[in-house]
Amino acid sequence: MAEDKVLTREGREKLEEELAYLQDVRRKEVAAQLKSAIEEGDLRENVGYSEAKRDQAFLEGRIKEIENILRNVQVIDMSKSNGHVQIGSTVTVREENYAPETFVIVGTFEADAANGRISNESPIGSALLGAKKGDKVSVATPGGKIFFEIIDIN
């Protein structure tokens, strides 16, 4: 892996839980689907068999993807917080003339902008990294630069 990818401890735990579910539960379900479809006979025109094979391929691909992520990721130690924004920080910012917004800075594997979890590699996430409470940071966006004041960091 050319560059280090990062996860919070919570993100790692979620991926480990997903992996365990896929390996211990979902694999058995897909195997049962395959067995049932095979028992129906002629596989050439068996839609259930085709769907089960597709599900199996997707499942095995996701298992390999998670295993690769977990093998090549750095887990961020939040106990080393020094009052600066880092991965895992919850940051409340205010853009002039707007209500404050709160973001959690996470690695790319955990990003979920709709739920306020932004990647450390996103324009806002990367601009906030290293800043401290009271700092003003500028973020280049397609619509021009915007400025945030950091209100709080947890």
Image: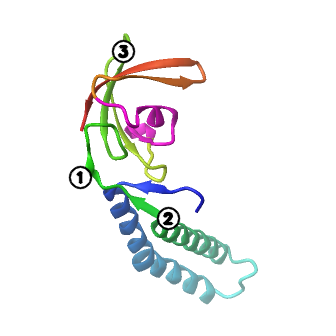
Q: Name the residue located 52 percent from the left edge and 77 percent from the top edge.
A: 30
Among the two numbered marks 3 and 2 on one chain, the one whose residue lies closer to the N terminus: 2
The residue indicated by pointer 1 is 79
**Along the horizontal axis of the image, is 7 left or right of 89?**
right
Among the two numbered marks 3 and 1 on one chain, the one whose residue lies closer to the N terminus: 1
Total numbered labels placed on residues in the image: 3
**Picture layout, residue 102 above or below residue 37:** above
Residues 148 and 50: in front is 148
Q: Position of residue 60 (x, y in %)?
A: 56, 74
Of the 4 image quadrants, the one containing the N terminus is bottom right
The span shown in magenta is 113-132
> What colouring method underlies this structural image?
rainbow
Query: For the residues carrying marks 3 and 1, which lies nearer the camera in this image?
Result: 1
The residue indicated by pointer 3 is 98
Residues 114 and 26: in front is 114
Residues 115 and 83: in front is 83
Indicate the amino acid at tag 1: Ser
The residue indicated by pointer 2 is 69
